[in-house]
Amino acid sequence: MAVTVPASTSMWDRVLEMTKSAQSKGVDPLMWALELSSTLLSAGVSMPSTKVAELLVSHICWSNNVPIAWKFLEKALSIRVVPPMLVLALLSSRVIPSRRSHPAAYRLYLELLKRHIFPLASEVNGPNYHKIMESIDDTLHLNEIFAFQSSEPGLVLVEFIFSVVWELLYASLDDENLLELVPEKKSPWKIRPMKMEIDDHNNYGENNIDYHQGLYKMNTITAIETIGEIFRNKVTFRILQLARRNMPAHWGSFMHHLRLLIGNSTALRNSKDITPEALLQLASETMHYCLRNELEAAEGPVPRLDTCLCLLLCTTTLAIVNIIDEEENTLLEENDHKHMHLGNETQALGNCRKSLVSSLQQLGDFEGLLIPPPSVTSIANQAAAKAILVVSGISVGSGYLDGVSLNDMPNICGNMRHLIVEACIARNILDTSTYLWPGYVKGHSNQIPRTISGQMPGWSTLMKGSPLTSQMMHTLVSIPASSLAEIERIYGIAINGSEEEKFFAATVLCGASLTRGWNIQEHTGFFIIKLLSPPIPVDYSGNESHLVVYAPLLNVLLMGISSIDCVQFFPCMVWLAPHLAGVLMPICEVFGSCSATVSWTLPNGEHLSPLSVFSNAFILLLKLWRFHQPPLEHVLGDVTPVGSQLNPEFLLLARNCSLNNQKSQRGIFSNLSSSEPIFLDSFPKLTFWYRQHQACIASTLSDLKPGTSVYQIFDALLTMMFGNISKVGQSLSHSASGSSNSCGSIPEDCANRLKLPAWDILEAVPFVLDAALTACAHGKLSPPELITGLRELAIFLPASMATIVSYLSAETTRGLWKPASMNGTDWPSPAASLAMVENNINKILSATGVDVPSLSAGGTTPTLPLPLAALLSLTITYKVDRVSESVLNLAAPALNSIGASCPWPCMAIISALWVQKAKRWTDYLVFSASRTVFHHNSNAVVQLLRMCFKSAITQPPSFSGGCVGGLLGHGFGSHNSGGISPVAPGILYLRVHRSVGDVIFTTEEIVSLLMHTVKDIVCTDLPYDKLKKPNGVVVRYGEVSLSAAMTRIKVAASLGASLVWITGRLNLIQSLIKETLPSWFISGHKSDLSKGDSGGMMGMLMGYALAYFAVLSGAFGWGVEPVSLYCKKRPIILGAHLEFMASALDGKISLGCNKATWRAYVSGFVSLMATCAPKWAMEVDVAILKSLSKGLRKWNEEELALTLLEISGVNAMGAAAEMIIESLV
């Protein structure tokens, strides 16, 4: 029905009159919307129209708040007459403040929000995107709220999505009278009307008070559920991640408000759609804390092997504990605790625990893989001895096996399984009945000595009540505790003992019990964190922080956990590292702000300064967030190492999140630290330094203005570092290496000027470094003078090493500095060891066939970028000892990262110079250099992959299933008589895969190498002339050879799947199945087949190999269980792959591969899916499965076609039944 409007009125008046007229006449909303669209098009108005959106929202709010007006608006949105995001913005500014008086309008707004907030692509790609974003910004004043200078559309989009969630959150808090708990008195959002509202007759359905109140309460629940939906949606979730990353202050405030809602909201608890825990989990996933520790290069000298094995067992076992607990807690809830009470303990044995038991029992069949390394043999023997004693009925008291060595138990053969079982028993997922497993105990109690001669006072002596003396401390530091009770006893002494005993106890906690505490390691770390956050003394009345009182004890702990073994422990314990950061930050803030005139006298008479305590805490904090890794966008070279996402904000967010996740914390871990959340803004000095650190990485420094306090410190530092240069003159060495002592005392006037808090000094350090490096580049400061000055700075304030590393690393990546000639005159020369490094790199890579570029081509002098040369030269001035370890462990990883990203042979030069300094690190240093060969040469990576396949299928004489030893090797180093040995290709790839730039290319190469490997296997195991007699009958030899070939082909396919998974994880697996494999089948590969085979046998085995490879890859990425949150794309990608198969079988797609290969692949894939992953089929569209089943029947694969339908669930059940009936006719 057409609506008549006078022609004389303006365009926008006509639109408004058309709407009013249609409203009064009850015109169908769709007809009105179509007519409006036609009118606008005739007038040349571009759609979606921002002006029409403003008119329609103004029309509704509030003179026409009636159902038909809302329907008009909804239809205008549906056919894109008006832009959805702008309409939502306009409504939010009008409706949310009036939601109390207009609850029905608020409900309609929420429904429109849920319907139109998610399909963002149509607007972003639409014609009026920029104009729409400008209108949204004008409507909501987003740039004013978030304080951004730019109005770029994408930025406004992020602000808008974030504002929608935050505004709903704020309104929900207000609805439940929780805003009084919000510290901010002024709301950033307009959630209440500016003046008192008067209800009018247009408030449809809102005059009934009961209805009004009921709808008002339901709206609060709906608003909270909408917040959850926005977090669940992948697109809006990722946009919120951007807000979290780039608006840390606003995000911190938002999370604080969200926690208030979660902890106090009645509406949230009444929701049937989302629980408080689920909402917290959804929000917390935007700050998911993922420490990248697996297979990462060791920091400097390699940690002890027993430390690494201990940590691996601890983390793995605790992960298993969480999996088992999650399943069994669910079982308890489902069974309502029926029949689950055994004594005082509640149990519900789930499948995971049973699978663990079964796996550990079967592990005993592989004794050859369980032999412990020599450094672990003693502890493995003790674990075996404990089992023997328990089985023999002998009580194993605390400390019974203290001091028992390998020589005391010559006939006890402990292995890695004994250690694994003990780790599980200690975490209460197994009990001592495990000792009764067949073959677990191999020995008798009479083989264990009842007394140990010459035993030092150990843990048993302590537990019997002996005091903790200096002699006992030195013993307990080197022997890990065997039980939680022993560690608790030490912790008690650290809390309640004398001052001397507290120091002894702290030292013991930081010793072997932390680094090699096989079954109590996590508890030791917990107690250390507790000691680093001491309570306020009852009688304390000082004005400064109470932490100052504990300075000597804190310093003992900080120094104790600064070793490489301890530094490795905490980041791997993902639930402990954030809490450690949470206690280190207050220490840094307090002691970094202390006056330099303050000091403490230690028991040995030495004086402890605030600068020392601060430096120890600060350097340790930096190591927790992988400070050495440069941001991705600031790395030079053709290889970009992964930039660290772990920073102080991440650590605190992870800590705060864990406070609300008590369910996942076990036992004592539930009270790990203060229950109050901590934010980076709580530490203004640390925050300022962190912002300055980020600025130094992002761009060059701005000029420093004379006369400021920072300039005065800058001038004093330069005088301290270089003021005596002209006086000392020729006494300086031409080489920066060698000395570990300060080159001169600090002038008295500088010392007085620098009696400042550490934070003030650190602020000036970047300007000092910039001035010094610039002076060196212009010849005003010689390289030895530069290095001497940098060393003076690092000695004066060890924490400044962090800024030195950060600044020089960033300047290296900028590529603005001239190269430094490492000639032995100005800069140290690597010449003495460069040839040895090159020779050993060739030996390491000799098994791969990769050519190593010459390090001395043309006889030119090696060069390094000037900042890198300075950092390298500074590090080699330090002695390799316990005192310098913490500083070197901070700088060495940065050298590794920057050196690897710079052009060849920078890393080799770094290694050559450090080999001269620390010969015992030669193996580690040379191996680090050898990896960079692959960073700059994609052909070398392909050759390495080729050798991985070759070594995996090589048959040793005693084993026909492939050669794991050839693939992974048995370590490397110069411990053999023949010097340094080649490194197995598999180990090399594990070390270099992160540097692979084009992962798609790598995947294609893996597929190609797999096919060539199959060809090699066929040619080796199945020579064509031996497979058949002249009459064509297959001989017995051929049957045996085929079985052996299939075994090796499965090994090759398993390796291929593993390599794809390692290289690119889930995304690359999905790309493989969605794109790479279909492309391979479509393109031609018939030339790959043997001429004699004619594509039959070889083609078939190629197809089976690809099927095994594809299904195993999918299992790695998706699992085989029902689809979960982490593999929502599985039904889509798998469905597309099966549809590709069905289309090819139906002749709709032309294939270029061999027919035998294609047939073997399809039948093999479907068969493996049916056998190993039947739940995959249940997620695929039944029409696709029916089509594929039909194609299989054309091949006379009746049974396989039926099996496919049988595993596909209820929807395919009818088709399966019809096929059964048809096949029986």
Image (cartoon, helix red, strand yellow):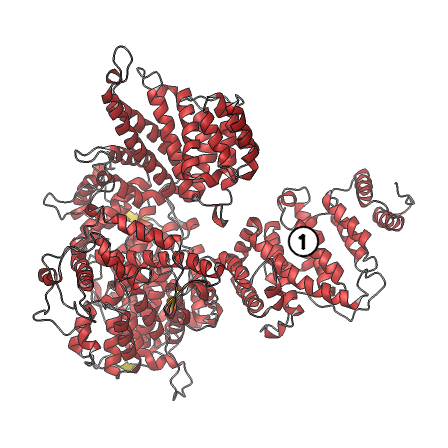
| Vertical relation: 227 (above or below) 1148 | below
Residue extending farthest left: 453
- The foreground one among 1201 and 1139 is 1201
Horizontal arrangement in the rendering, residue 25 relative to residue 401 (left or right) = right
- The foreground one among 828 and 337 is 337
Location of the N terminus by quadrant is top right
For the point 62% across and 72% down, which residue is it?
178
Q: Looking at the picture, how far across and down is residue 965, in whole percent? A: 22, 41
Quadrant of res 390: bottom left
Q: Looking at the picture, how far across and down is residue 121, in whole percent? A: 62, 44
Q: Secondary structure at mark 1?
A: helix
For the point 24% across and 42% down, which residue is it?
968
Q: Looking at the picture, how far across and down is residue 676, in whole percent? A: 47, 72
Q: Looking at the picture, how far across and down is residue 882, in whole percent? A: 21, 65
Residue extending farthest top: 1031
What residue would you read off at disc 1?
Answer: 113
Horizontal arrangement in the rendering, residue 198 relative to residue 1079 (left or right) = right
Query: Would residue 1195 be visible to someone looking at this image?
Result: yes
Three-letter code for the amino acid on which mark 1 is drawn: Leu
For the point 20% across and 52% down, which residue is it?
439
Q: Residues within 10 Å of mark 1 (few under 14, many from 20)?
A: many
| Vertical relation: 958 (above or below) 671 | above
For the point 27% across and 82% down, which residue is it?
497
Quadrant of res 415: bottom left
| Vertical relation: 790 (above or below) 683 | above
Query: Would residue 638 be visible to someone looking at this image?
Result: no
- The foreground one among 954 and 637 is 954
Image label count: 1
